[in-house]
Amino acid sequence: MKFGFVRVLLLIAALFVAIPVHAEQRNFYKIGVITELSGDLVTGGNITKRGYDLWAQEVNAKGGIEVQGKKYQVKLVYADAQSNPAAGAAAAERLITQEKVDFILGPYSSGVTLAVAPVVDKYKVPMITGSAESPLIWKNKFKYTFGTIPPINFTGATSIKTLTELKPAPKTIAIIGSNDAFSKATAEAYKTAAEKAKLKIVKFSIVPSGQDMTPLLSAVRSMKPDVIAFGGHDEEHVKFVKALKQIGYTPKALLMHCGITDKAFTDAVGKDGEQIFGTTCWTGTAKTKSKVLWPTASAYAAASQKAFKNPGDYTQGGCSAAGIAFQTALQKVGAKPGMDEAMRAKLVQALEQIDVQTFYGRVKFATSGEFYHANVGLDPLTIQIQNGQIKTVGPKASVEAAAQYPMKEWKSR
């Protein structure tokens, strides 16, 4: 009995011991991509795919990544996380142990990223997510995981500050978030910023992901908040706008974060998207300059428009910037395809040291503190949809257009 129990313990322990990943000799980089290609988060997953694809296409069109005088093409190997953390973790293990990828470009969602990060740490394979923004990722201090988009608790306060500078300034706010890692963190970031700005919070609620918001918003309507702020994912934003319109309540300002800068959102809600505020760290009109691939934000947006009939949003851009970060680090340490564990460790060190100006802006990963391995080189922006276009309305140094406030009533659009 005792011997059998010991055998079970040994078996469980064995499952958590990484099998060494042996290098493969190749004349191209084999890059694993884990993202949500099916399930509830497929819209965001497809945005990340566009970003990774565009980077790979541009690199290969230029002959590949030049390392020590030789150019190496890149090949992306996709694995579907199915909008499920467990599936994402299994996909990571398969890419590493079976496909023997050199490194990984990471998921769209924070929940899947949190599941994948321990796997890449276990096998010591570097990963950069071009999308995930939950502070939980960086607070866990995963050694092999990096991110090109700053965490929401780094960016979230900017849009609240912009709203409080409007005339007349709003005085009350209702904050709602879906109960997943990113969306909940977004709502919490808005709550912290609102408290600091002395906005009266008339409602703060975290609700199950995918829940029909109509009953909750009907209750919020009676509180008549000046601002409604929502933390959710792409599809949820569309449903949220439709629910507000259905109950006939137009706040003075509607603030959402992820997803409203992508063409899919404006296509889905049409004129009802007008005057909605959002938080971002990049737009296609940002004043950036780079010597790596695309020279400016507008050049990237034009390339995206040509490739996908979509200029791309900050998530897609963050994914392309993730590729550039790897590209820069590979060149820095002279890492050729088929890296062994020692070279992958050097690649991590190189990522920690890079400070590069890209079409996306500055990429510089923190090496300590609560933002460990997140990109802290970018300045957050407040944006608003105006005449179907994304316009930067804050902070003052970056303003492209004056904020339109208050919002037009749904019925008068």
Image: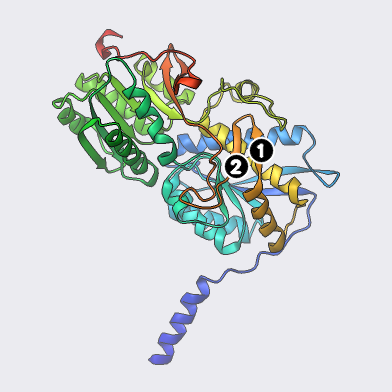
Horizontal and vertical percent position of residue 232: 36, 36
Q: In this view, does 282 lie to the left or right of 39?
A: right
Disc 1 residue type (three-letter): Val
**Marked residue nearer the N-terminal end (1 or 2):** 1
Rendered residue at 49%/56% (across/down): 141
The local secondary structure at tag 1 comes to strand
Q: Distance between the residues labelled 1 and 2?
A: 7 Å
Rendered residue at 56%/23% (across/down): 286
State which quadrant residue 98 falls in. Answer: bottom right
Horizontal and vertical percent position of residue 198: 25, 32
Give the position of the C terminus as an image quadrant: top left
> Going by the picture, which residue comes out furthest to the top?
412
Q: In this view, does 143 lie to the left or right of 21?
A: left
Q: Are marks 1 and 2 in contact (CB under 8 Å)?
A: yes
Horizontal and vertical percent position of residue 226: 23, 22
Rendered residue at 40%/26% (across/down): 278
In the rendered view, how is the structure colored? rainbow
Which numbered marker is on residue 356? 1
Question: What count of labels does the image hold?
Answer: 2
Q: Residues within 10 Å of mark 2 (few under 14, many from 20)?
A: many
Please name the residue that numbered disc 2 is placed on: 364
The local secondary structure at tag 2 comes to strand
Horizontal and vertical percent position of residue 388: 44, 14
Disc 2 residue type (three-letter): Lys
Which numbered marker is on residue 171? none
Q: Is residue 328 left or right of residue 47?
A: right
